[in-house]
Amino acid sequence: MNTAIEPFKTRLFSVEHALSKPWPYIPILAAICMFGIWHVLTNVYLTEPGLWQNCIHFAGFAFLAAITTSRFEKNNSQTVFWLNIAFGVTLAFSSLWIAHAESGIYSRTLAKTGLSWQFTFIDWFAGIMVIVGAIELTRRLTGWIIPVLIVLALSYNLFLGEMLPGAFRAASLPIDDVLFRSLYNDEGMFGIITTISSANITLFMIFGAFLVVSGASDFVIELSKLIAGRLRGGAAFVAVLSSALTGTISGSAVANTASTGVITIPLMKSNGFRPAFAAGVEASASTGGQLMPPIMGAGAFIMASYTGIPYGTIVAVSIVPAILYFFSVGFIVRIEAMKHDIGIEKPDAVDKTKMLAGALNFVLPLAIMTTLLVTGKTPSYAASFAIATLIVVSWFTPNKMGPKNILRALSLGISTAIMTAVLLVAVGLINNAVTTSGLANTFALMIAQWSQGSLIIALALVAIASLVLGMGLPVTAAYIVLSILSAPALAGMLADGLVVQQLVAGIGDPVKAATFMLVDSPLVAKVATGMTLAEANEFMRTMPFELAVVIRPTLVDPAKMTVFLLTAHLIVFWLSQDSNVTPPVCLAAFTAAGIAGSKPMYTGVQAWKIAKGLYIVPLLFAYTPLIGGDILSVLQIGFFSLFGIYALSSLLQLYSEGPLSIWMYPLLAVAAAACFYPMHLLANLIGFTMVLGIILLTRKRGQAA
């Protein structure tokens, strides 16, 4: 059959191509769309067991991944094509068998007196098949890094752990136990992480596809032109605004760069910006799309699951930080425009027809979804309701979502979700190995020991780890691995700040004071009476990690511990984004460089400089009540931090509204520190005044030049 050797993966999700060449595209396209509808129904109306839902989820995406990552079109071989079809079908049936076999495994094991799990031959085959298949599909989709990590993780549980020395030594497990835990544990392949994908992420990707097909993305671009067209360097502000708004749809930095960059980067170049700078602006702004509520990429869903904190709460506390990030990008754009005398030339004429056509389709469904999330509805319900709203309201616009457009949106959403769905199932193998072996606790202990109680050193270690992991892992995978390994340690160190305060004041409760008696330090005698700040910090540094884990819950309120846990996860989440814009491997920057025709590595350097907010905002998380503070505190921190960020931007560019004198450099550094000083109004006002003074002074200098 000649159609079998066509470039199948580029046509599989095309409604138009299926209608022009019915076989085999129409049946597969119909199955894809039904798969998309199933994701909506199973999260709203159907009551399937969680294991069945996750196994069906993987079965469908494994089949699609197998046939869309095939290499058959390169060697024109029908054999390779049908081998991939067989591979996908085998994976799908193996996944479904795992859900079917669970009760039989339990009953056979209980009937035996031994301790081993009782798998049949088919159970073994299906289990090994989905593990090997997940590894292979992940290799095709993301490269070798994640497969190697999975193999190391499985080996660590099977035999490698008992061969390693010191803290990394761990008891080995029988192969049947490793297989059972990998498949049926909540931390395994079809556990919590896959539930996030099947219940939330895929639905939001389908919703994003509906927004794109309905013309909402056109509205984003045209609105950005309208708002930014009157500013100096307006084309670059179009990139910032459109990427911020598109981030509410896509939640993917690379997809955001590719979709908006083809429009904004040529606009910036024509406006007078250097190609590498234009590409860097687009890459850094698109990276912020994953930080932009309400979708925030896949990480926010995983964060909600790991912390037990409602998704709406995570979205709400992320609004001000996201604004700070996009202002940090905008400040660099403004300073660059002033430095190179880029004018107020409008980037392009606004297409009011496109803007009005997409306005209702963008604003109303997104507003309703955000409202539902904030009021406590589940993400799956909010996304499903938003999709239904979009279909209805589209009939009052020129971009009506009829049957053909609905099919197009469903197929686009499913095709977009393939990599994430397969990746999250595969990452479950790493998650299971880490939690089963206790490696997460070991890593937390190492962070505590290496940092010697210093939060800033711990943050630096996490930042370095995120950069290294990000060279080979997608952002979501990097966040998952880092959050498992480092978030508990960071949360504990944040909580230690409150413990230090109590040690300085003295712990009068004899029961609470007695918990410190096991600490081998002469300062233990001062626990009840009080210590100096230096003594309290030294005392916490000498406290064994295991003892600190026990003591914190007795001295820190549970609500505060929840805030610290959320803060730690947000720090890790933000730092995980830096791999998009930080050399030597920065996919968003490289994507933008390809559009701009600039040197990839130099573009990466520009993007890293522009995206400095990825490092500033996590520091605000750690040292200020930006997360968990009352609304006035958050607004105060956000307002003064804007001026601190502007001061740092000026230092990076060695320019403000006009040229900087050398004597202004230390003043800007001091002003930035004063603006960031946590909850000290006088220091904040001094810093604000200094920054404002330099802005006014350099503006006069720039006008005179």
Image: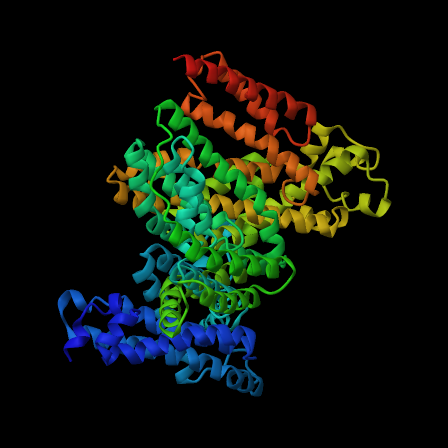
Q: Position of residue 94 (x, y in %)?
A: 39, 79
Q: Position of residue 544 (x, y in %)?
A: 65, 44
- Relative to 480, residue 279 above or below: above
- Relative to 647, residue 350 above or below: below
- Way the structure is coloured: rainbow
Q: Is residue 167 left or right of residue 411?
A: right
Who is closer to the viewer here, 660 or 464? 660
Seen at 36% across and 57% down, the residue is: 148
Q: Quadrant of residue 36?
A: bottom left
For the C terminus, the image quarter is: top left
Seen at 40% across and 42% down, the residue is: 225
Who is closer to the viewer here, 483 or 267? 267
Q: Is residue 433 left or right of residue 561?
A: left
Is residue 477 among what the camera can see?
no
Seen at 14% across and 72% down, the residue is: 77
Q: Position of residue 322 (x, y in %)?
A: 53, 43
- Relative to 637, residue 243 above or below: below
Q: Is residue 388 left or right of residue 506?
A: left
Who is closer to the viewer here, 446 or 8? 8
Q: Position of residue 244 (x, y in %)?
A: 46, 46
For the N terminus, the image quarter is: bottom left
- Relative to 503, residue 248 above or below: below
Who is closer to the viewer here, 703 or 503? 703
